[in-house]
Amino acid sequence: MFVNRFSGKLSAMNKLSYLIFVTSLSWGLQAALAAPAGVWPDNKQQQRLYQQVQAGEVVSLEVILAYLRERYYGEIVEIELEDDDGMLVYEIEMIGPQGQRAEFEFAARTGELMSVEGRQLKAMSKQP
């Protein structure tokens, strides 16, 4: 866990490790979404997903992340964009300041928050 259990804050080294992890994750997702269609020649679902992102049929990841950062305390630790029976869904996992975990699901085409699961979500919320 990145949180110092005594102070509840990230240490400088853990912040750097976390930053490297999140940056790598972000670059990996961007590379996957920006890769030419031929990268996945055997996977029609991946090709279709890529084409939908390129066509602007999907709300950008930046918009989704801005929404979360405005409303919740915590750090994003995992991002997935999946085709769930024809519906594109962003699944984003966050870890809150007290070590709690939350998973958010957004409809990728509209940006609508579909569900939130986790414990102690009120402690993560920036809104009263």
Image (tube, rainbow, N blue to C red):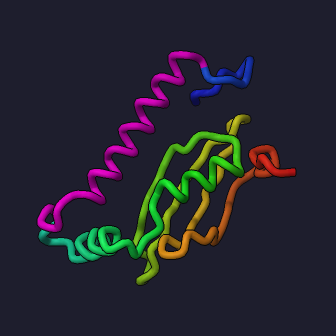
Q: Is 54 or 102 nearer to us in this picture?
A: 54
Residue at position x 41%, y 83% in the image: 86
In the rendering, at what x and y percent does residue 55 appear?
A: 32, 74
Q: Is residue 60 above or below residue 123?
A: below
Question: What secondary structure do most residues of the magenta stretch adopt?
Answer: helix
Relative to 98, 105 lies left or right: left
When asked about the image quadrant of residue 115, the answer is: bottom right
In the rendering, at what x and y percent does residue 36 appear?
A: 17, 62
In the rendering, at what x and y percent does residue 103 appear?
A: 61, 56
Q: Is residue 83 above or below residue 38?
A: below
Residue at position x 68%, y 49% in the image: 70
In the rendering, at what x and y percent does residue 39 appear?
A: 14, 61
Specify the segment rendered in magenta.
11-39
Relative to 15, 4 lies left or right: right
48 falls in the magenta region: no
Q: Most extreme residue toward the bottom, as rendered?
A: 86
31 falls in the magenta region: yes
Residue at position x 46%, y 80% in the image: 87
Q: Most extreme residue toward the right, as rendered?
A: 128
When asked about the image quadrant of residue 114, the answer is: bottom right
- Label count reads 0
Relative to 33, 108 lies left or right: right
Indicate the quadrant containing the N terminus: top left, top right, bottom left or bottom right: top right
Residue at position x 68%, y 60% in the image: 117
Q: Is residue 72 above or below residue 114?
A: above
Relative to 5, 81 lies left or right: left
Q: Is residue 33 above or below residue 11?
A: below
